[in-house]
């Protein structure tokens, strides 16, 4: 799974190679991230030491590939992924 968070408060998830499998809005409150999917359901995640735990996935930030997409040091312009063993 890959998740992209934008400065405008939108997200897009790629699941099983399907881009845009889930899209919607997100909000951050300290270490908690709240999602409202465009289909109307809510989801939640929690950051622990810079690692996002969401829907059974453990995701880490990855730098943006193209500097024209924004500041690679910004978590908003970075994709979050790939899945790794959290055990």
Image (cartoon, rainbow, N blue to C red):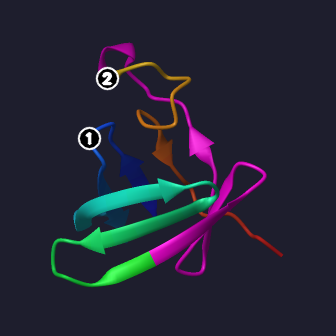
Marks 2,1: beta carbons within 8 A: no
Query: In the rendered view, would you say 57 is above or below 4?
Result: below
Query: In the rendered view, would you say 74 is above or below 59?
Result: above
Q: CA distance from mark 2 to mark 1?
A: 13 Å
Figure quadrant of the C terminus: bottom right
Residue beneath disc 1: 8
Residue beneath disc 2: 69
Q: Is residue 5 magenta?
A: no
Q: Point out the stretch of residues depicted in magenta.
A: 44-69
Task: Name the residue located 26 percent from the left edge and 41 percent from the top edge.
Answer: 8
Q: Residue 48 at what x, y percent from top left?
A: 75, 59
Q: Secondary structure at mark 1?
A: loop
Quadrant assignment, res 18: bottom left
Residues 29 and 72: in front is: 29
- Mark 2 is surrounded, within 10 Å at the Cα level, by few (under 14), some (14 to 19) or many (20 or more) other residues, namely few
Q: Secondary structure at mark 2?
A: helix
Q: Residue 6 at what x, y percent from top left?
A: 32, 41
Q: Residue 71 at what x, y percent from top left?
A: 45, 19
Of mark 2 and mark 1, the one earlier in the sequence is: 1
Q: Is residue 58 magenta?
A: yes
Residues 9 and 50: in front is: 9
The extreme front residue here reads 29
Query: In the rendered view, would you say 85 is above or below 7?
Result: below
């Amino acid at each position: 799974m890959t998740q992209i968070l934008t400065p405008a408060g939108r997200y897009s998830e790629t699941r099983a190679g399907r881009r845009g499998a889930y899209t919607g809005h997100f909000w951050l409150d300290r270490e908690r991230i709240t999602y409202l999917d465009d289909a109307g359901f809510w989801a939640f995640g929690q950051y622990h030491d810079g690692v996002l735990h969401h829907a059974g996935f453990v995701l880490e930030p990855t730098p943006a590939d193209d500097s024209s997409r924004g500041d690679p040091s910004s978590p908003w312009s970075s994709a979050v992924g790939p899945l790794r063993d959290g055990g």
